[in-house]
Image (cartoon, rainbow, N blue to C red):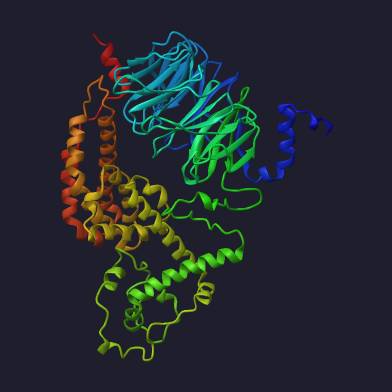
Amino acid sequence: WGLLARPCSRCRRFRRAAMSSSSNSKRLWKIQDFVAHSGQVQCARLGGKSGQVLATGGDDRRVNIWKVGKPNALMSLTGHTSTVECLVFDKEEEVLVVGCEGGSIQVWNLEYRKMSGTLAGHRTKCSSIEFHPYGEFFASGSVDTNLKIWDLRRKSCIQTFPGHSAAISTIRFSPHGRWVATGSLDNHVKIWDLTAGKVMKDLDLHKGAVTSLAFHAKEYLLATGSVDRTVKLWSLEGACLNVGSSQPGMGSVQNVRFYPEEKSVVGASQDIVRLHPCDAMSTHSDAIDVDWKCVHDTRLHEGKFLSVLSEGSQVSIEVLDLQRKGDSLQRLRPPERLQPGISPPEQPVQSSPAAVAAAVTAEVAAAVERVKAADAERRFKHGPAGEGIAAELPRRDNDPRPTSPGIAPGLGSPVAKKAAMPPPTSSSSSCQYPGIGAPQIDIASFSAQHPQLVGVLQRRLDQAKRVQELWAKGNLASIGAVLQMPQDQAVLCDFFGSVLRKDLSGSLNLDSCMALLPLLQDMMTSKYEDFAASALTFSSTLLEQFGSIITETRLRCSEIPERQMDFAQEERYVKCNRCYDAFGEIQKLLAEGISPAVAARFGAFRSSLRVFLSRSKKKKKKRPEERTSELQSP
């Protein structure tokens, strides 16, 4: 222990690890640890679609494909002529592109486990590679300082961007696909405009080699990490200003990633992971000690930070829980970082049981008062048509209310429609339950007697607020990440009914259609017929609004010119294909997956769907290897 007084970085890491090992053990755990190659591991990458497929490359000139959590490789790809330096999956995890030390790039078809082509263009080591978010394009960077854009359909380079004075170390495409950012050993970050074919911005504030880049998924922000031990945040609007920089840490920043739920940037080094608030980058809201030799890839989902690491021939996968601090079970959000009009997180922000109970009670009280003001008299004098708060109250023997499950009153439910009817007149108020007017409910005792109902109401209230926030921002594309649980279908049903009743379907766009169709498919298989009917009604509205757009786009873009660089059209084409596939699944559900009684009510929709799918059907594209053989044939 006397060695801990020495001021070397190794000892400082050991001291921090010794002092915080008990708390870190609850936040950091290892999923997998295995020998991946016979030599040094040079690169590792997770698939973007499932996050369950891992590719690793090493100086043994092999690429091994693994299933996360499984000890044996799914396949081993050989035939590379030099050390494998970088690799990346395409969006569907069907194609793997590999960059090698000699400068060549190999394209693998994973379905057939065969190399479908070799691309030559770089003069020396290919150091980084990245797929475009839309279309069959990818970018590669090299020690020769050039950035190249490749078209998989033609299997050739279509653009070359010189400009860096040292090797390119990392590449990232913007979410909309029109820009590509490169980080280099020359300490610069360059943002290239793919349409104009030139540098748009040159960011030069780092004092060391740039190691990692990350675009924000919804805002014009870029995070960069560097060997100078700092994380910097850049605004890409207007003059592209540096809006914040972290204090230098103990070691090089190996990976950066945005944490949108906390409005923070995660910076991972060899010895520590820090969370930097976007509005105060010079500080950190959390710091967790780690011992990560080399970070190759990361994922962040629901507060869990997954990292793919390597040391020598070993690869390990570890998970860090960013929502837990010390021994607490919940991550507390600092109140000063909440923005006006933004709903608080789903987890309660109070730490003591009494405070949590008080918050829940207050929410329930507000919900009860709103329901009571709207339809209390109808419920208690004439009986509700479905489940709700009043359905949980003690019932009289002659209470005619049904016991079958329903949905709570909302914007689009059958109960809401009945609740919207005019209340009974005073002449009819004398009767079924003499002496009962608007009931006086003891909220505290009610909450204690019906904790399950309180939980359901609280979640529904939180989810409704989130949907309202997404609608206000015009960002329904992310609604699938908010409403993931089966019990959220009641919120969806209310939302669909409100949009249709207020005739707001014209405010939807193609992104909304693509995001909503999978949710509608799930609702169609619900055991509640009201949910299935609501989903079919809304699907019919989407087909009517977007059917012609999808048909026209698919037919016009089914044979895209080989050297075309219209990324906006590529993006739209991909979205329309996904919508078409979703409507095809709905047709199958109408045939066999939905209650016949419900399906019978939507014969016109079934006919329209059949016509749409027939008209929108495009000629099937040939596989990459088939196109290659055609190009090689005389």
**Quadrant position of residue 486:** bottom left
Residue 158 vs residue 109, the one in the foreground: 158
Q: Say above or below: 110 vs 59.
A: below
Relative image position of residue 201 (x, y in whole percent): 39, 24
Q: Residue at x 62, y 41 (%)?
A: 28
Relative image position of residue 348 (x, y in whole percent): 53, 58
Q: Say above or below: 198 vs 298.
A: above
**Residue 127 horizontal side relative to residue 522, left or right:** right
Residue 237 vs residue 528, the one in the foreground: 237
Residue 620 vs residue 87, the one in the foreground: 87
Q: Is residue 153 visible?
A: yes
**Residue 590 horizontal side relative to residue 548, left or right:** right
Q: How many marks?
A: 0
**Quadrant position of residue 418:** bottom left
Relative image position of residue 390 (x, y in whole percent): 40, 76
Q: Residue furthest right?
A: 2
**Quadrant position of residue 42:** top right
Relative image position of residue 634 (x, y in whole percent): 23, 8
Q: Is residue 388 visible?
A: no
Residue 263 vs residue 480, the one in the foreground: 263
Quadrant of the rendering where the N terminus is positioned = top right
Q: Residue at x 34, y 57 (%)?
A: 492
Q: Residue at x 30, y 53 (%)?
A: 593
Q: Say above or below: 528 vs 290.
A: below
Q: Say above or below: 67 vs 329.
A: above
Q: Residue at x 15, y 45 (%)?
A: 611
